[in-house]
Amino acid sequence: MSAASRAPQRSNRAAQSPYRAARAVRARRRAALAAGAAAAALLLTACGSGGTSGGGGDTGFVTGTDGISTVPAGKRVAAPDLSGETLEGEQLDVGDFKGKVVVLNVWGSWCNPCRAEAKYFAKVSQEYAGKDVQFVGINTRDGSTTAALAFEKDFGITYPSLYDPTGKLMLRFEKGTLNPQAIPSTLVLDREGRVAARSLTALDEERLRKMLEPVVAEK
């Protein structure tokens, strides 16, 4: 092959190189976006046995042998904005419950540990009705409200649940605080809207009361 015949081929390859470079950049961007989405998903362990309970350092909270983490009143951090639409399509803002102790339970209808603890939440929430205690659910990763509403009916859940299918509400909690890291997770907020206690596992009636009663007793 003559030098003249080879020249057009080199020219064609040179013309294609910017296109290939642009395609490589797009591929790297897609990979970076996928990695970011995966990292965000890892903030919530789907129906796991629990995440990092923490404690020590300057976090200000301590985890007991029962897996319940607590914070002294002077070191508590305010919960982030937790507002939106409930499963019934009504607007709800957890901040409106300041002055009451709030129990937040993160759950999904597809989650077996959530199903195991649901009857205890139904029972304790009814017992504390009228005692300045408000239970609020955060339903996540349910593709529609149909299964979630059926779950509430099956287990006698009468308190409202925010509908958060993508988990965006949980991502509002700051790293290093008592944030919900698993499904199910339970947080107890004191009367000032600060996170006082957390569990990253399913709770029975005894452990739920153990989380709730000390915060209710605070004056």
Image: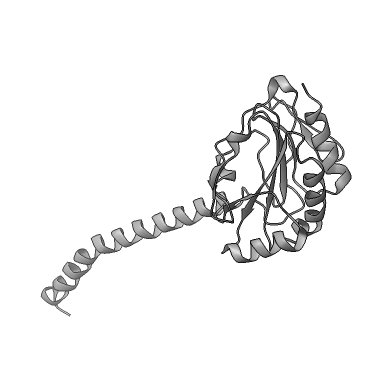
Examine the rendered structure and indicate whether residue 8 appears above or below residue 218: below
Colour setup of the view: one colour
Residue drawn at x 75%, y 48% is 50
In x, y percent, where is residue 23? 32, 62
| Residue 174 seen by the camera | no
Give the left or right position of residue 32, taking residue 70 as reference.
left
Examine the rendered structure and indicate whether residue 89 appears above or below residue 104: below
Given the current orientation, which residue lies at the most extreme top position?
Answer: 74
Given the current orientation, which residue lies at the most extreme bottom position?
Answer: 1
Given the current orientation, which residue lies at the most extreme front position?
Answer: 130
Quarter-of-image position of residue 149: bottom right
Front-most of residues 41 and 134: 134
Given the current orientation, which residue lies at the most extreme left position?
Answer: 4
Examine the rendered structure and indicate whether residue 125 appears above or below residue 150: above
Examine the rendered structure and indicate whether residue 74 appears above or below residue 107: above
In x, y percent, where is residue 60? 71, 25
In x, y percent, where is residue 196? 72, 31
Number of numbered discs on residues:
0
User: The C terminus lies in which quarter of the figure?
Assistant: top right
Residue drawn at x 45%, y 54% is 33
Quarter-of-image position of residue 56: top right
User: The N terminus lies in which quarter of the figure?
Assistant: bottom left
In x, y percent, where is residue 163? 58, 53
| Residue 127 seen by the camera | yes
Front-most of residues 93 and 210: 93
Quarter-of-image position of residue 177: top right
Residue drawn at x 60%, y 58% is 141
